[in-house]
Image (spheres, rainbow, N blue to C red):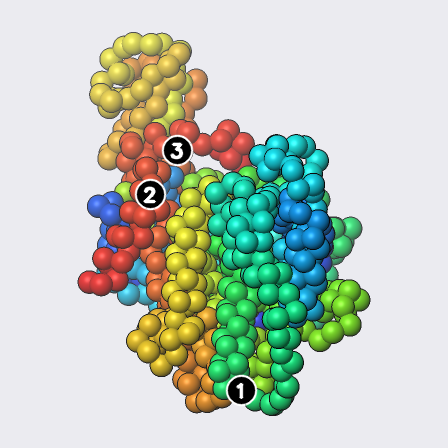
Amino acid sequence: MNGPSDPAPYAVEGHGLVKRFGDFRAVDGIDIAVPAGSIYGVLGPNGAGKTTLLRMLLGIIDPDEGHRSLLGASEPLKQARAIGYLPEERGLYPAMKALEAIAFMGALRGLPLKEGRRRGRDLMEGHGLGDAIAKPVRALSKGMAQTVQLLGTIVHGPRLIVLDEPFSGLDAINQGKLEALIRRQAAQGVTILFSTHVIAHAERLCERIAIVAGGRIRFEGSVSAARDRLRPQVRLETRRSDGPWRAALPSDALVHDNIWTFPLPDSGVEPLLKALVDGEAGIESLSIERPGLHDAFVVIAGPDAMRDMGALEPAEEAA
Amino acid sequence: MREILRAAFVIARRDFTAIIFSKSFILFLIGPLLPVVFGVVAGSLGDRMANDSMRPVVGVALSPGEGKALAAARERLVQHKGERGVTALKSYAEASNPQALLARKGQGIIAVLSGSLERPVLTGKGGDVDQLEGDVSLLVSIARAGTALPDTQIRTQIVAESSGSEQQSRLLTGRAAQVVLFMLTMLLAGMVLSNMVEEKTNKIIEVLAAAVPVDAIFLGKLMAMLAMSFVGIAVWSTTALVGYQMLSDSPLPIPEPAVGWPLFVMLGVLYFATAYTLLGSLFIGIGAQASTVREVQTISMPITMSQVMIFFFASYSVDRMGQTPELVAAAFPFSSPFAMIARAAQSDALMPHVMAVAWQLLWVAIIIRIGVRLFRRNVLKSGPGEKRPGLFSRALVSLRQIRT
């Protein structure tokens, strides 16, 4: 490790970031601040500008407007040795041996090859890839190759790890392993910044999130604050389908087979409950559910974003 | 700068070992030797053909006495010019019809001398007669003069140096060096074009660009390819020299250059390196813009044509040392290495080479910078999936943006 934590409060900062590709504004004035030592998620549908934002923050491309700071450096590449980056499009040299690939990625970021091989061997054995050490990348399964690249991302002991859609293409078991690895790194004081369009991962991992859509940040804050954007939802199941008690329900309540779903009224649950009992609704069950991040995302990112999310792979949604 | 060099070395090391230890590298080494082998075989066959069947033979249909006189005249001329330097003769009966002789199959003659030595007639096709008329006329004149023609013996004096001869010889060395330099550059630098496409195909380019400056990626790839080229050149030149030693016991018939062989070879290596990196930096910059091998193939043709034109220009300037064409060729970055190696063959001044190498390396740095800027603007961007403009449109837009 290069250090247990960053002295600066924010590991990553960006102010007024704009990136244009021709007439298209891929990133349209984004402000972002990732607290040091946190797990921070950038959520958004495909084409929202997440990858462009990460590439700008990392110095792979330059912003047309605005400025950025990575671990206190305004030129991100100057901090390259303290950063690990897993791009969305995974790539390794097919003929290279797995261990050499990890050592090479470490060497790019200043780790001597010999030390890279030593650490790479430990990492591979620790992640159940001991048998694959001498195998060329082309002989590995997709999941194994992705793990090798991830190990190459952390082999040099970065203080900041940036992962672009890290769960993409992984099965449920490998997604779980990756989540555990992220938590382990965070526990050691490493700042994790990752993008995803699978909200479940962000909900489980992140302390703070930014919801990006159309090149802009629609929400920035804690997962809890995002969920608080929506009122708690009431789920009511009745024996009767009609009666004077119906007047107590909001007009936009949804119903299906005598199961009613609607936001909790401002007056609270007690007046509602009294009206249902007095009106003889025949309550089978009543529950008040706090909205999930997915619901909050839909409201914040908008219906267009939701349509994009609908095109996601079923496996990813299930995760 | 230190970090760029460190990162470039890491990339160069990876690329170099990946290439050297690949099976296809053997093919790379063998490939250029095949044309040499074919050339030697074809040259040998051609030589034999030139010795035997391709030599012009003139049929002689004169009286026996005049025929003998003509044969004696030929013998006298052969003593001075050698067997191959004098037209071969084949005797026929005096009464033979020249047209009939030429029409007869299997005779192998291309013209017939008939009539008499006083009034000779040469019959043959237009081009053949034009070519042979002078030689045959000389033979007939010697035959007619007979013993009256004095046989003059010339006393010879050998000198170590002759400025005219030396100039001609060094010109030959300069041209030969240019051709070798051009062939090697053309053969090897083109491979850089597709180098970045491989990185993009493997999708590793983003890993590299996030970890090290793009300048280091370009520089590292150039270093690796240059090192690989030197391995190839070492193998080919050693093979060629060993082959020559085995086939011939005489030294290489190339005149010594003005700066001497050791320095000339060093300059050759240096100018190959600069020519290679100049073209390579241009290729890698352009090739980095391409998304597919097809795009690389599309852009390689105009580049190859430009290379050939630049070579012709440099070649044109060889015998105009100190004149405007040679100075322009030496100053224009892409022709500079070719012009300067020719200059090294003809002039022993060293300072121009120091300046030229510095000038060429400056241009390598400039071209890499431009290539890097184009790359960062065009290649590493993710969009909404809209139609990507063509290669040249992208390059033009980027150049306009750089200018503003």
Q: Nearer the viewer, mark 3 or mark 1?
A: 1
Residue drawn at x 56%, y 66% is: B180
Q: Amino acid at mark 1?
A: Ser
CA gap between label 1 and label 2 equals: 59 Å
Please tell me the numbered disc located at residue A199: none
Q: Which residue is mark 3?
A: A309
Amino acid on which the number 2 mark rests in the picture: Gly
Location of mark 1 (residue): B162
Query: Is residue B318 visible in this depiction of the protein?
Result: yes
Camera-side residue of A271 and A310: A310
Q: Residue at x 62, y 78 (%)?
A: B152
Name the quarter where the N terminus of chain A is drawn: bottom right
Which tag, 1 or 2, sits closer to the chain's start? 1
What residue is shown at x 43% (from left), y 57% (from top)? B308
Chain on which label 2 sits: B
The answer to whether tags 3 and 2 share a subunit is no
> Which-is-in-front pick, marks 1 and 2?
1
Nearer to us in this view, B370 or A268: B370
Residue B39 position within the rendered picture, expressed as x and y whole percent measured from the top left: 66, 54
Q: Amino acid at mark 3?
A: Met
Residue at screen point 76% across, 68% down: B248
